[in-house]
Image (spheres, rainbow, N blue to C red):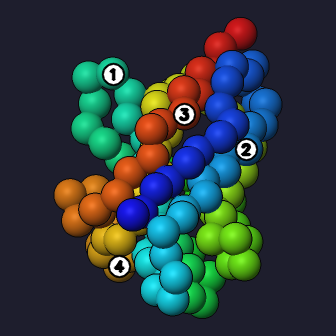
C-alpha cells in the first residue's frame, strides 16, 4: 500500500525560505515518478516540479525555476522542496504525488497523493 507523508510548511515573511519533505512508502523495487504541486483557493492545481526518482532528473515549472529546488534521498524515497525568496503569491496548499507522467507533469495522471502542507507567505 503506497503512502506519501509530507512534513514542513508554515508561515514565513516575504523573502523567507521553507522546506517541505515527502516520504513515499510501499514501494519495494519500483522507483516512481514523484512531483510537487500547489493549489491556492479558487485556483487550479499547479505543477511545481516532477522528479524521476530513478535518476534524479527534475523538471521545473518556469514560475518557480531559480527559487525552488527539488532534491531526493533515494535510499529513503524522500523528496524535498526547498523554497527560497518566497512571495505572497506562493501561498497555497502544497502536495506531493507519486506515479504519474513525469514529462508532462499533469496532476490528473498522478495516482497517489500526500495530505498537503499549508504554506503562507505574509508580513
Instruction: Quarter of the image for the C terminus: give it.
Output: top right
At mark 1, the secondary structure is: loop
Viewer-nearest of discs 4 and 3: 3
Tell me the CA gap for discs 1 and 2: 21 Å
Tell me the CA gap for discs 4 and 2: 24 Å
Tell me the CA gap for discs 4 and 3: 24 Å
Sequence-first tag of 1 and 2: 2
Q: Residue 103 got which mark?
A: 4
Image position of 122 with respect to 86: above or below:
above
Q: Confirm whether residue 13 shows in the render.
A: yes
Q: Residue at label 1?
A: 41
| Mark 3 Cα shell of 10 Å, populated few (<14), some (14-19), many (≥20) | many
Sequence-first tag of 4 and 2: 2
User: x, y percentage for residue 105?
Assistant: 34, 66
Sequence-first tag of 3 and 2: 2
Q: Residue at label 2?
A: 19
Q: Residue at label 3?
A: 117
| Mark 4 Cα shell of 10 Å, populated few (<14), some (14-19), many (≥20) | few
User: x, y percentage for residue 26?
Assistant: 48, 69
Amino acid at each position: 500500500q503506497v503512502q506519501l507523508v509530507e512534513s514542513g510548511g508554515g508561515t514565513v515573511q516575504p523573502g523567507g525560505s521553507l522546506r517541505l519533505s515527502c516520504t513515499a512508502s510501499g514501494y519495494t523495487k519500483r522507483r516512481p515518478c514523484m512531483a510537487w504541486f500547489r493549489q491556492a483557493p479558487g485556483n487550479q492545481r499547479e505543477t511545481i516540479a516532477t522528479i524521476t526518482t530513478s535518476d534524479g532528473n527534475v523538471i521545473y515549472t518556469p514560475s518557480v525555476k531559480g527559487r525552488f529546488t527539488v532534491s531526493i534521498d533515494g535510499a529513503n524515497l524522500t523528496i524535498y522542496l526547498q523554497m527560497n525568496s518566497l512571495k505572497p503569491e506562493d501561498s497555497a496548499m502544497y502536495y506531493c504525488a507519486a506515479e504519474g507522467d513525469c514529462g508532462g507533469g499533469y496532476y490528473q495522471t498522478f495516482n497517489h497523493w500526500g495530505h498537503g502542507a499549508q504554506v503562507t507567505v505574509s508580513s
